């Protein structure tokens, strides 16, 4: 029997899974691995064929040879004396959008399996390989999700953070007068700072003085004093003449 399946992931990723017996075991539909099996592929395999289900108890072996992966095994019926042998080879090949697995294999045995014709047996085997490919793709999706979760949030933020040029930062430097005003206010109370008059070029410009008003006020005092002194002298002189 020969059958091809497609896995939508790169060939190197597919090879990593096929090289790990424990991960292959997770992808085999109906395989219940023994708790004490460790890395060995031993346990029970439920095979649905036609309208029946046959459970086999046995072991599988995974080997890599010339770029292909070979799965071989044997088992006995859990409820009967029938036996089964399996030899399956899978060759991963890169293709657009993913990986093609070309599978060839043979199955032999005695017991209940011989009750079904070749077409029915091959149909069950193709369905098993299709489900294996779907489980393999799901295994690789979990790997991709775990890789994304492993990236620290800070690294993602740093990667997307905008870059600033030095001249932009220079434009944002505060004026020297403003910086000096802030330094001189250190240590003063909040009320003093709030009511402190602006300094430097931020201080209010006083209104220009008018020449007429300032001049009159500047000379009015001395002129009045001189006039008063003169009046007193004249008054005394007139009194003496009388």
Image (cartoon, grey):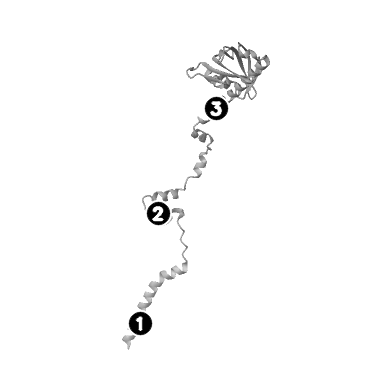
x then y, percent, for residue 121: 65, 16
Residue placed most toward the observer, 205 or 41: 41
Which residue is depicted at the point 66% across and 18% down? 123
Circles 3, 1 touching at the beta carbon (< 8 Å): no
Q: In this view, does 223 lie to the left or right of 78?
A: left
Task: Tell which residue pokes out farthest to the left in this image.
Answer: 240
Secondary element under disc 1, as helix, strand or loop, is helix
**Which residue position holds label 1?**
234
Q: Is residue 99 visible?
A: no
**In this rendering, the label closer to the viewer, 3 or 1:** 3
> Residue 193, which numbered label?
2
Looking at the image, tell me whether mark 3 or mark 2 is earlier in sequence order: 3
Residue placed most toward the observer, 236 or 206: 206
**In this rendering, the label closer to the viewer, 3 or 2:** 3
Residue at mark 2 to residue at mark 1: CA–CA distance: 60 Å
Residue placed most toward the observer, 187 or 140: 140
Q: Is residue 206 above or below residue 95?
A: below
Q: Can residue 171 be seen in this view?
A: yes
């Amino acid at each position: 029997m020969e059958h091809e399946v497609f896995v939508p992931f790169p060939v190197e990723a597919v090879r990593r899974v096929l090289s790990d017996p424990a991960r292959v075991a997770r992808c085999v539909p109906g395989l219940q691995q023994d708790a004490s099996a460790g890395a060995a592929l031993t346990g029970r395999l439920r095979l649905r064929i036609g309208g029946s289900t046959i459970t086999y108890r046995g072991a599988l072996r995974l080997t890599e040879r010339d770029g292909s992966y070979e799965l071989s095994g044997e088992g006995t019926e859990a409820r009967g004396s029938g036996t089964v042998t399996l030899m399956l080879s899978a060759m991963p090949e890169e293709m657009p959008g993913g990986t093609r697995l070309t599978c060839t294999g043979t199955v032999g045995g005695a017991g209940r399996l011989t009750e079904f014709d070749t077409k029915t047996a091959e149909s069950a085997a193709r369905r098993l390989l299709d489900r294996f490919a779907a489980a393999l793709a799901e295994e690789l999706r979990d790997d991709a999700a775990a890789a994304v979760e492993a990236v620290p949030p800070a690294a993602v933020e740093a990667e997307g953070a905008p870059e600033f040029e030095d001249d932009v930062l220079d434009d944002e430097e505060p004026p020297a007068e403003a910086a000096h005003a802030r330094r001189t206010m250190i240590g003063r109370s909040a009320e003093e700072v709030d009511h402190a008059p602006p300094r430097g070029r931020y201080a209010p410009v006083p209104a220009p003085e008018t020449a007429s008003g300032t001049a009159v006020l500047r000379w009015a005092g001395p002129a009045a004093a001189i006039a008063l002194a003169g009046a007193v002298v004249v008054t005394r002189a007139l009194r003496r003449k009388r």
